[in-house]
Image: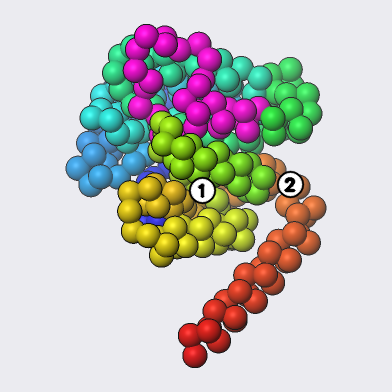
């Protein structure tokens, strides 16, 4: 598993003054601005990355604005230290990502994207969200493919493609496998692509994480060269840290986001059995 060098942050945790500024689309209050700068400076000195979490749309435009300002300052030298979260279930997300890509391209900073399906369906205006889950799946996969292919529509083709780093965060096996397979094809064809990483919650979709790790191990064992190093998936597990009360809202949103997990139980059980059998056979081959 990749070493944990990231931290996730939510602006609304800053208190009522921050929430008022977010709602009114104002700059961060001075105390919040100072705290953000202190945290980001420390993260930069420790080579740590920061993901800014997505929230309800009443706050999101301001969150995007504050996060862009942080990206302009810290996402330099072809490296994204600050990541913004984009929710694929929102109809405007492809347009919003294209806007951020154009800014990164014209202003010369790296864009860090954490792509999720979305977790505020119970509190958002319904018209903002795709009509069906299949539409959301198609949007998520389409966004990922355009980013990996470096073919996102709406960019200036006369300028270099902006440095982009993508974290595919989710528990949908089809999306994860499609993203990895697409990047694998591009690397093998010596075509340009982006930095691609994968993340799942601790205790959820562990069979997907294990499969990605096995792909990486196989790539490294076959031949220790630059190609196979690129193909070795970067896999992360997200751990909620704090008291039960502090983590409850986050965990409840993840439960909503993954409410179809029960339908995948049989698939998970079969995958774990297959992984267990593989390890048993491997242990006998060494003995």
Is residue 80 placed above or below 253 in the rendered structure? above
Tell me the CA gap for discs 1 and 2: 18 Å
Quarter of the figure with the N terminus: bottom left
- Which residue in the structure is indicated by mark 2? 259
Is 169 on the left or on the right of 13, as rendered? right
Q: First in sequence: mark 1 or mark 2?
A: 1
Residue at 44% x, 18% y is 100
Q: Residue at x 78, y 61 (%)?
A: 266
Please tell me which residue is depicted at 65% across the width and 76% down the height of the picture.
277
Judging from the image, what secondary structure is the residue with disc 1 in? strand
Residue farthest to the left?
A: 45
Q: Is residue 163 left or right of residue 279?
A: left
Q: Please state the extent of the stretch shown in magenta in the rendering.
A: 139-168
Is 43 positioned to the left or the right of 211 in the image?
A: left
Q: In the picture, residue 182 is in which quadrant?
A: top right
Q: Position of residue 75 (x, y in %)?
A: 29, 29
Q: Which residue is mark 1?
A: 199
Q: Is residue 21 magenta?
A: no
Q: Secondary structure at mark 2?
A: helix
* 155 vs 76, nearest the viewer: 155
Could you say which quadrant of the image residue 123 lies in?
top right
- The mark closer to the camera, 1 or 2, is 1
- Estimate the x, y position of residue 56 in percent, counting from the top left: 59, 27
């Amino acid at each position: 598993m990749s070493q944990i060098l990231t931290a996730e942050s939510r602006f609304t945790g800053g208190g009522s003054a921050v929430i008022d500024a977010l709602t009114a689309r104002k700059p961060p209050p001075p105390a919040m601005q100072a705290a953000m700068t202190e945290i980001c400076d420390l993260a930069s000195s420790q080579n740590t990355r920061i993901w800014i979490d997505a929230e309800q749309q009443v706050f999101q435009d301001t969150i995007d604005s504050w996060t862009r300002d942080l990206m302009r300052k810290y996402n330099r030298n072809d490296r994204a230290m600050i990541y913004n979260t984009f929710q694929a279930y929102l109809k405007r997300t492809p347009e919003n990502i294209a806007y951020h890509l154009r800014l990164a391209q014209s202003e010369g900073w790296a864009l860090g994207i954490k792509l999720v399906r979305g977790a505020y369906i119970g509190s958002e205006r319904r018209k903002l969200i795709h009509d069906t889950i299949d539409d959301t799946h198609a949007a998520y996969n389409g966004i990922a493919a355009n980013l990996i292919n470096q073919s996102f529509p709406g960019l200036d083709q006369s300028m270099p493609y902006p440095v982009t780093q993508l974290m595919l965060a989710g528990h949908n096996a089809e999306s994860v496998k499609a993203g990895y397979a697409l990047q694998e094809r591009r690397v093998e064809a010596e075509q340009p692509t982006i930095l691609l990483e994968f993340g799942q919650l601790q205790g959820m979709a562990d069979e997907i994480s294990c499969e990605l790790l096995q792909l990486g191990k196989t790539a490294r064992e076959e031949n220790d060269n630059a190609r196979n190093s690129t193909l070795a998936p970067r896999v992360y597990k997200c751990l909620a840290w704090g008291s039960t009360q502090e983590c409850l809202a986050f965990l409840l949103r993840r439960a909503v986001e993954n409410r179809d997990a029960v339908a995948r139980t049989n698939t998970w059980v079969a995958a774990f059995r297959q992984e267990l059998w593989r390890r048993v056979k491997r242990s006998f081959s060494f003995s």
